[in-house]
């Protein structure tokens, strides 16, 4: 079984995908970490004329087995990720790693921005997670503060809104759900309610697919 979880920055898709992986006993991949790692690798050259070539090379050489979520979570790294994610060479280089993870025999849960449309269009269940920008910014701020990081909340909201703008402009950004994805708005849901709703939607998707076989 493949579960695809997409959505914009800080929508909670990673938390929900991890919970789905635990509930259905499936391995989970936060694909955003791949782009964050590439973005961090070219941080010093992010505004250079050859940044696309540098980022593509970094993606081709990326070791996907040693990614540290704690190290890559920061808001600044998220901005870098959104900048390199628009490069076709980067997306092509990272496609194989994501597709291999999705198609392993045990099944998988992947979260990102183009899982249901590009990486796993054949996924058994597709969720698209949304929430209002202010709610997403608050959740991310509390997440970072819980890790001991100092957060400029106004800047964090501005960063999320800037990422939203880039996602809307990108053909595979976080505002372009698959046609068969189920929309889950978590604006007014706490984490427990959101997880319960996500599990219910996946179970319903699996039931619908089984009924058509």
Image: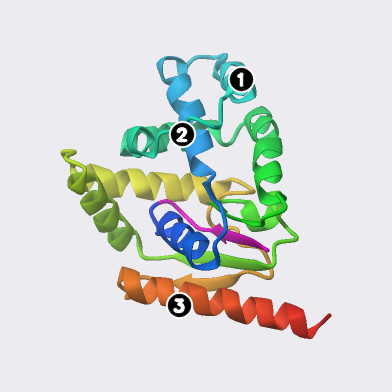
**Above-or-below relation of 75 to 197:** above
- Secondary structure at numbered mark 1: helix
Label 2 vs 1, first from the N-terminus:
2
**Residue 94, position as x, y percentages in the image:** 64, 34
Label 1 vs 3, first from the N-terminus:
1
In the rendered view, does 55 fall on the left or right side of 161?
right
Part of the protein shown in magenta: 1-9
Q: Quadrant of residue 74?
A: top left
Q: Nearer the viewer, mark 3 or mark 2?
A: 3
> Residue at 28% across / 50% down in the picture?
157
Residue 61 marker:
1
**Residue 23, position as x, y percentages in the image:** 49, 67
Judge whether residue 8 is colored magenta.
Answer: yes
**Residue 72, position as x, y percentages in the image:** 38, 34
Please state, as top left, top right, bottom left or bottom right, where the N terminus lies in the image.
bottom right
Crowd around label 1: few <14 · some 14–19 · many ≥20 (10 Å): few
Residue 37 marker:
none
Judge whether residue 149 is colored magenta.
Answer: no
Gap in angstroms between the C-alphas marked 2 and 1: 14 Å
> Residue at 56% across / 25% down in the picture?
63
Crowd around label 3: few <14 · some 14–19 · many ≥20 (10 Å): some
Residue beneath disc 2 = 36
> Residue at 54% across / 18% down in the picture?
51
- Secondary structure at numbered mark 3: helix
Q: Nearer the viewer, mark 2 or mark 1?
A: 1
Residue beneath disc 3 = 197
Using the rendered image of the protein, determine whether residue 47 is visible from the camera's viewpoint: no
**Residue 124, position as x, y percentages in the image:** 69, 67
């Amino acid at each position: 079984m493949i579960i695809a979880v997409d959505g914009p920055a800080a929508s909670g898709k990673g938390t929900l995908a991890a919970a789905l992986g635990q509930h259905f006993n499936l391995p989970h991949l936060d694909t955003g970490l791949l782009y964050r790692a590439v973005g961090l690798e070219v941080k010093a050259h992010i505004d250079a004329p050859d940044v696309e070539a540098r980022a593509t090379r970094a993606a081709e050489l990326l070791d996907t087995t040693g990614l540290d979520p704690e190290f890559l979570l920061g808001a600044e790294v998220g901005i870098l990720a959104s900048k390199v994610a628009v490069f076709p060479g980067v997306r092509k280089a990272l496609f194989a790693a994501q597709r291999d993870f999705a198609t392993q025999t045990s099944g998988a849960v992947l979260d990102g921005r183009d899982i249901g449309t590009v990486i796993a269009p054949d996924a058994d269940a597709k969720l698209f997670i949304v929430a209002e920008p202010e709610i997403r910014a608050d959740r991310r701020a509390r997440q970072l503060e819980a890790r001991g990081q100092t957060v400029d909340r106004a800047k964090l909201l501005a960063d999320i809104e800037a990422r939203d703008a880039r996602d809307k402009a990108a053909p595979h950004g976080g505002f372009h759900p698959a046609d068969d994805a189920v929309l889950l708005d978590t604006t007014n849901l706490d984490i427990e309610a959101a997880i319960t709703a996500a599990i219910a939607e996946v179970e319903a998707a699996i039931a619908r697919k089984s009924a058509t076989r």
